[in-house]
Amino acid sequence: MGPRAALLLLSLACSCSAQKVKVRAEVTGYVGQDVTLPCTYSPDNSDIKITQVTWMKETGGKKTNVAVYSPNWGKNLPNPRISFLKESLQEPTLVIKSLMMTDEGTYGCEFATYPDGNEEGTTRLILLAEPRNSAAAVPGAVGDAVGDREITVANCTSANGKPPSDITWQSVLPGNVSTRVINNTDGTITVNSQYKIFPTSEANGKTVTCIIASRTASVPQNIPVVLSIQYPPEVRISGYDDNWYINRQQAELTCTASGNPPPSKYEWKTASGQPLPNTVDVVGNLLVVKTVDNLVNTTFLCQATNSLGTSSAQLEVLVRASPNTAGAGATGGIIGGIIAAIVGIAVVATVVMIWKQQRKNQTLKDDDDLEGPPAYKPPPPSVKLQPQDMVPVHKESDSEESVPLKPIPFESLSRAEVDSEMQNMPLYQDAYGDQGLEHSEHMPSTEDDYLEQINPIYNDLSYPATDHYQDSRGFVMSKAMYV
Ligand SMILES: *[C@@H]1O[C@H](CO)[C@@H](O)[C@H](O)[C@H]1NC(C)=O
Ligand SMILES: *[C@@H]1O[C@H](CO)[C@@H](O)[C@H](O)[C@H]1NC(C)=O
Ligand SMILES: *[C@@H]1O[C@H](CO)[C@@H](O)[C@H](O)[C@H]1NC(C)=O
């Protein structure tokens, strides 16, 4: 190592001299509590002499001494709440008691040394104040909304905090939030947030949650608020079964009304304004008829009232000479209709299937010049089959790409489509359903064994198996057509 390099290293070491003063960059404290601002000096050279230490507070670019210590002259502590932890030139840690909001600021710990001169480290003191959080529903009424105006339905406040809290809302109700921040004279900040919606009766009883995040809490605080929206009664009459007949015993109508506040008064009337027939008893929100007669052949009206208003619903009762059986009949009719529809679909499907098979039969017969159904006489190996019949079953069912390669034996397009669809299926699928299809996809080479397994009767009907694939293919087709 040459002298130049040594010099460079030395100068690098010297650039670190500022770190001889060790302080914390930031210290936090709560109002009313005490805080310590650590400060130490570690000289890299025992020849360095410290003559005095000074703590200064920096406000608006102006520095004020808050604590001075010199072994020769003693201490100077102008603020009775501010002192040194101990009398020490190497460790002049500062203590501030009963923190006040005004104590917040930047504090410099400065050492007067010889021969290096002054050395300083600074600490930012941040005052925290724990906010008081609260949230509540703001009672509103449906009628309060004038035109498009939204109303405040929940109010959330994080008061006297520092730094200011962050308030958000969680809700299933679409709404708008308006937030105000207030700088209090004591240096704390109050944050208020309001949740606004267009008031509806559906919003009553719904919950919105105020979420308050603050530096003084490790997790945000959630305060659920149940909304209270007042609305006039919403009335409904239930219990009418459309089967009120002369001399029926015990018929009832129920009047239910929602509302906020809950409706306090129910009133049954006739819609025409006539007094209620004397065969009718009113029990709270129930209208009870002991024995049905012509007098109740009328329209009833139920009125419910709360502090926001009165609403009503009406129901027309039809008194019949004899019990109404149409209700039961109608139910039976629906079930019958469903059954008829299912049977009908099955019949149509069967007919279509038979027709298709017969078309196939016919085509084969024409092309192959065979007599009688091929089920009994499979074509001999020498007979030329139609190309689509020679394509192995599994290939046909695997992909539609093979379809356009095959000749379309019929003149009209729609018919051709129908038939190409048929060709895509294994021909015995109609007889054996999905099992046959799956079988042909996974194990196409054993399809005949499979068929013989599931119905041995075909063994009796079949010709002795040959090695020729076309033969066995024709044989399979024959079985399907036989069914
Ligand atoms: C929220 O405020 C916007 C703009 O003022 C308004 O268009 C919207 O309708 C308000 N939505 C609700 C739910 O209050
Ligand atoms: C509150 O204080 C902040 C910073 O301390 C300032 O930016 C803001 O303008 C003040 N707000 C009011 C309403 O005085
Ligand atoms: C009830 O009134 C209706 C007309 O509103 C009428 O058609 C019906 O015959 C009446 N029932 C009886 C039993 O009088």
Image (cartoon, grey):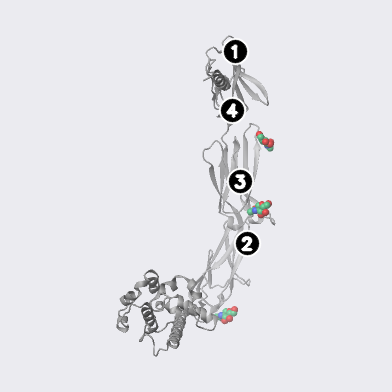
| CB within 8 Å, label 4 to label 3 | no
Q: In front of the other: label 3 or label 1? A: 1
Residue position for label 3: 155
Label 1: state its secondary structure: loop
Residue position for label 4: 125
Give the spatial CA distance, label 4 vs label 3: 33 Å
| Residue 95 position within the rendered picture, expressed as x and y whole percent measured from the top left | 55, 22
Mark found first going from the N terminus, 4 or 2: 4
Mark found first going from the N terminus, 3 or 1: 1
Residue position for label 1: 115
The three-letter amino acid code for the residue at tag 1 is Pro
Give the spatial CA distance, label 1 vs label 2: 93 Å
Judge: label 3 CB < 8 Å from ligand 1: no
Q: In front of the other: label 1 or label 4? A: 1
Residue drawn where x is 65% and y is 42% of the image: 180
The answer to which of 23 and 271 lies nearer the viewer is: 23
Give the residue at the far right of this rendering.
Answer: 147
Mark found first going from the N terminus, 1 or 4: 1
